[in-house]
Image (cartoon, grey):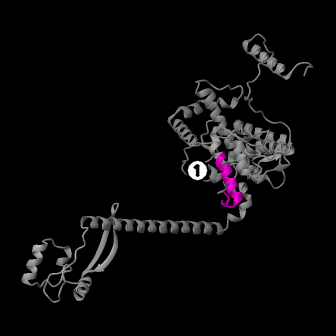
Amino acid sequence: MRRGTSRGTWKGMWRVNQEEEASGSQPSVRQKRARGQRGAAKKLEGRHIITEVEEDGRPSAPAEAAKNYVRHSGWVVRDNVPVSTVYWRRTRARGDHESFVPDSEKEMLWTTMLETFTLPAGTEDKVKRWTLKKMAEQFQSFKGDLYQKYILKGQTSNFDTFPKLRDHWDEFVAYKTGEQGQAMMERNKENAAKKKYHHHLGSGGYSVAMPKWEQMEASLIERGIEPATANWPERSKFWYYAHGGTLNPADGSLVFGYQIQEVARRLTDAVEASSQGTFRPDRDRDELTLALQTPEHPGRTRGKGVIPWKIGFKEDIHTYRSRMRSKRDTEAKIADLEFRVSSYELNMQEEVARKVDECMAAHRSHDPQPTIPPAMVSPSGNRSSCASTGQVGSQSMDAMQTQDESTCPVDDITQRTPCELHIPFKNLSIKVRFSHSASCCLYMLITNK
């Protein structure tokens, strides 16, 4: 930097230069590529050696060789697989008439990679699996870019950059603009719309971003500042960073946008509950799953990338083939079900008791004065309210009819009969009592009550 020129002045000068170039007053020697755009990857020359491989099969060291490996795999798949190929692999739902990459061609792609790269001994199998999966992603992204840049605009691709596109371009355009291609894109749009949180990792993914996040935390610790994520599990804080969250360089506090503010709050609460013992993380049902409120998708691990659970949760590998976890889950479900049933029964009993009290109160309100039944002499012949034999005396019967012409349903019962007492509850009729009418009447006749 020139002495005597402030940093702000240099920024202003840079801004002026940009405006001049944009206006055409300062024609540049060559046209610069817009920021974020990259040219087409070219074939990698020479021999390159990979010394380290991650557990999922991704080459990781040396760093430059690992980057070249990913770039070269993209070139290999674009240069060898026709763009008109619809699917990467064949499934049961897809018939023989569907276009997919055959296994023999995938073997050829892998052999082409080994012509340029040397791998550590004993790692070829897992690197091959990772490479073919990466190629599938790169091939789909390549076709998506062609659709966005050319087909949607009614243009034709530059065959000078991709000469092998020429022979398959018309077929590719016909599929993308046809009924099947449009239906697939609609399904993809619907699935993409269901995704609530979107990461900001770029093409490098978690493997490139993780060292940067660790360096950010280390710089705070070196200055005596404890990051707010110091006690967070790796999966939780890496997901937080990947989705736009960061740390305040002044005090290490959380800084995040409104898109993840609820998740950040729930993450903080979940980590606190875990430290206090009120929440017990269990493999995929950990703090992050609790905060996101959605179960983990098999085959990938949120907060770590597109890696299987056996790698993403390697500390819990002992639970994968053990029945202990399944037995514990079953016991927990049974205990929860028993608690719900007992709670429901208790609520029902309380509701029944309340209904009975209401019915009794309503009955007392209609007949507030207690009635004293006349003395009954057995066998006097008076008809009782509990259905006696029906033998009556003429004078007593006339007296009763003059006092009360109403009758009770049980007056017609002349033998031992089971009876139930029901009360209405919502749209149900609930039995609250069971007895026999004759026994009650016999007791009343004998005791003269």
In magenta stretch: residue 314: no
Residue 364 location (% of width, % of height): 28, 67
**Is 211 placed above or below 403 here?**
above
Horizontal side of residue 348 vs 386, given as left or right: right
Query: Which range is magenta?
Result: 264-284
Residue 278 image point, x, y percent: 66, 60
Q: What is the magenta segment's predominant secondary structure?
A: helix
Camera-nearest residue between 427 and 191: 427
Say which residue appears at 68% left-offset and 47% top-offset.
Answer: 104
Q: Quadrant of the N terminus?
A: top right
Residue 78 is left or right of residue 347, and the answer is right
Task: Name the image quarter holding residue 171.
Answer: top right
The residue located at (70%, 48%) in the rendering is: 303
Secondary element at image label 1: loop
Residue 416 quadrant? bottom left
Q: Which amino acid does label 1 sit on?
A: Thr
